[in-house]
Image (tube, rainbow, N blue to C red):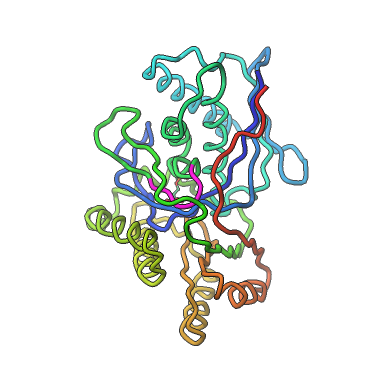
Amino acid sequence: MKVTARSTPNIALIKYWGNRNNDLRLPAYDSLSMTIDTPSVDITVEDSENFSLRSFLADGTEKNLEEKDIARFMKHRELTNHYLHFLGIEEMIPENIAITIESGIPPSIGLASSAAVFSCIAKCYGSFGGTELNDEQVSVIARLGSGSATRSIFGGFSAIEAGDGNDIDTAKGVQIADESHWPLYDIIIVPSQEEKAVGSTEGHAIAQTSPDWTQRVEAMPRRQSECISAILNKDFEKRQVVSEEDCMDMHHVMETSSTPLKYLSNETHRILGEVKELRSSKHLEVLYTMDAGPTVHLFCTPDARADILSFANAQQGCTVFETTVGPGTSMIEKA
Ligand code: PMV
């Protein structure tokens, strides 16, 4: 058997940071995002005589995988087997498989490459063998590799419902509105292509050490429901206010945890200052958000797109991606 799936990153508007169970990546609270249409990753999983994992970059060069990368995929497969056992279908994925990743996403720049990769591999696993898992089940498998990958299964706008307890299936993805609901753009400004020092897996594990963690957790249900209703009502301003508040609060928790994690650079802050000025002088519908890196995401409406794009392209030494709402993870080939 051979299956190939395609997926893309999603960018959170209400951020996931911190778990109630690190091993199973069970988030501490709900979160919400928009799935973008590009750049994408394709993954092929096929029967093989041995286990193998190979990863190729956009230009076709093979990435040198470190031991910790391979260990993460092995752990993900082990956890996936636990979940399949829980569903009563553990024989779905054979012991020996060959996994080939073809990624168009520059690694570790805050562009959620792990979300695209683990949602994509989850789709392959969920279609391997006779049984086809549904999107909710595939989202659980995605979560076992990267919490935010839970949301990339779905097109448009989606959430992680964190649930409670420690059962493997208690946190899952759910679609809030599909990709035709609200045509928005995410113009992405990447100030630096350096790999980040501390990855999000390690970051989640120390989130609770911030003195302001409890305050964050308490604010999350309000933020989540405000953002969901802003999306359903296409209320840009309400969505802007709540998602910027949440983004800066997440970075505050990151920067006050022990060890402090400082993902935003001087360049990020300079860009934010200029965006705010541009927004008020031209009355543009644009909001900013940043994940675990210096990359700035500028979400905007079609009316603001041309101004935001020319602002982004004027940034010296930055890479710019233009994206819009994407359709989520899909099956490319099954043979
Ligand atoms: O899925 P992870 O473990 O890489 O966590 C991602 C966390 C953030 O990108 C910072 C926020 C989010 O909700 O995507």
* Residue visible at 28% across and 30% down in the picture: 166
55 up-or-down from 109: above or below: above
Query: Based on the displayed image, in which of its 4 quarters is residue 308 positioned?
Result: bottom right
Task: Tell whether 209 sits left or right of 80.
Answer: left
Q: Please give the range of residues in magenta.
A: 154-159
Query: Based on the displayed image, in which of its 4 quarters is residue 63 positioned?
Result: top right
Which quadrant holds the C terminus?
top right
137 up-or-down from 154: above or below: above
Tell which residue pokes out farthest to the right in this image: 60
x, y percent for residue 203: 41, 47
- The residue nearer to you, when weighing 205 against 190, is 190
Residue 53 visible in the picture:
no
Which quadrant holds the N terminus?
top right
* Residue visible at 63% across and 72% down in the picture: 309
x, y percent for residue 133: 47, 26
x, y percent for residue 202: 43, 43
Task: Tell whether 53 sits left or right of 151.
Answer: right
- The residue nearer to you, when weighing 28 against 39, is 39
* Residue visible at 52% across and 43% down in the picture: 115
Query: Based on the displayed image, in which of its 4 quarters is residue 194 positioned?
Result: bottom right
* Residue visible at 25% across and 58% down in the picture: 222
Residue 129 visible in the picture:
yes
Task: Tell whether 295 sits left or right of 42.
Answer: left
Magenta stretch encompasses residue 305? no
